[in-house]
Structures are given as C-alpha cells and as structure tokens.
C-alpha cells in the first residue's frame, strides 16, 4: 500500500506561508515522495480491501491527487520533472524549495510514488515549518 500523510489546515481567516517542508519515510527500500497542495474539497480516502489486493488499483490515490490537487514537487521523473525526491530512512526535502502559500481550508500532503508498492512495514512522516498569518497580512521577508 502507498503511504500518504496530510497536514491540518490553516484556521479560518488565516493562511500559512511555508518556507520549509520535508518528509521521512522509514522504508529501507527507499521511496519516491511527492508533495501536493490539496483543495478544501479534497479528501484523502483510506484504501479499501479490494484496492489493496488489486495491483491495477494500487496507484488510485496517487492518480486522484495528480488529477485533483496541485503538485508542489514531483517524486519521480515520469511525473514531468527530472527531480527525484527519495527518502531512505532519512528526511527528504525538495531541492531549491520555494515559499508555498496554503490558503485557509487547504492542506499539504506527501505520498509515496514508486512504481512498485513496498511490502515492508514502515511509516511516512511530513514536517512543515510555517507562519500563520491573517488574511491580507503581508508575508515578511524571509
């Protein structure tokens, strides 16, 4: 199964200025990690037993994110970039990250995007450093 982690959202009337984000995947095989900005209507849905057993459906949540969310940083080269973001028992951070703005109601997510789903017991953690600012308030010079 693919591991997915989703952040909280900024409070109503506020937004986040995110200068730093990364992920830690404890899979000893190494996992490609992609980061997304998720709109308020998007829900990360748990896998059903049928989807876990069907290899054709193994990528359904990744396809759902690529279709309905904003890709911040791809985790493998066939997602339209030559940047590969891989975590192997260490933190992974996008190369030359730019400031991300997360509006109220939106959230961020990290997902494993390897072609082969790992059977190794592991977990995925995402860290986000942010400033929570009132709507209309300027982002300070970081």
Image: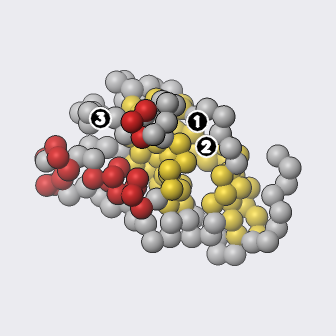
Q: Is residue 41 left or right of residue 59?
A: right
Instruction: Please state the horizontal and vertical placement of residue 31, each as a whole percent of the image.
Output: 39, 31
At 75% across and 72% down in the image, what residue appears? 135
* Of marks 1 and 2, the one in the foreground: 1
Closer to us: 69 or 132: 69
| Residue, disc 2 | 21
Q: Is residue 20 visible?
A: yes
Total numbered circles: 3
Closer to us: 25 or 57: 57
Classify mark 3: helix, strand or loop: loop
Asked if residue 19 is positioned above or below residue 81 in the image, the reply reads: below
- Number of residues whose C-alpha sits closer than 10 Å to that of mark 3, classed few (under 14), some (14–19) or many (20 or more): few
Q: Is residue 16 left or right of residue 120?
A: right
> Can you name the residue that lies furthest to the bottom here?
13
The image quarter containing residue 16 is bottom right
Instruction: Please state the horizontal and vertical placement of residue 116, each as a whole percent of the image.
Output: 26, 33
Q: What is the spatial separation of the Cα atoms under label 3 and label 1, in whole angstroms? A: 20 Å
Classify mark 2: helix, strand or loop: strand
| Residue, disc 1 | 94
At 67% across and 57% down in the image, what residue appears? 101
At 58% across and 34% down in the image, what residue appears? 93
| Residue, disc 3 | 115
| Contact check, label 1 and label 2, Cβ < 8 Å | yes
Instruction: Please state the horizontal and vertical placement of residue 2, each as a whole percent of the image.
Output: 31, 43
Closer to us: 11 or 56: 56
- Number of residues whose C-alpha sits closer than 10 Å to that of mark 2, classed few (under 14), some (14–19) or many (20 or more): some
Q: What is the spatial separation of the Cα atoms under label 1 and label 2, in whole angstroms? A: 8 Å
């Amino acid at each position: 199964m693919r591991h997915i982690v989703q952040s909280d959202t900024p409070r109503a009337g506020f937004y986040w200025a995110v200068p730093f984000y990364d992920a830690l995947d404890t899979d000893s095989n190494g996992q490609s990690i992609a980061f997304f900005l998720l709109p308020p209507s998007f829900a990360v849905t748990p896998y059903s037993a049928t989807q876990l057993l069907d290899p054709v459906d193994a990528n359904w949540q990744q396809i759902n994110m690529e279709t309905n969310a904003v890709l911040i940083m791809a985790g493998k080269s066939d997602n339209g970039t030559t940047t590969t973001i891989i975590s192997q028992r260490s933190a992974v951070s996008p190369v030359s990250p730019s400031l991300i703005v997360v509006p109220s109601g939106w959230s961020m997510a990290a997902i494993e995007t390897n072609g082969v789903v790992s059977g190794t017991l592991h977990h995925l953690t995402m860290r986000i450093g942010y400033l929570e600012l009132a709507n209309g308030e300027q982002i300070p010079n970081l």
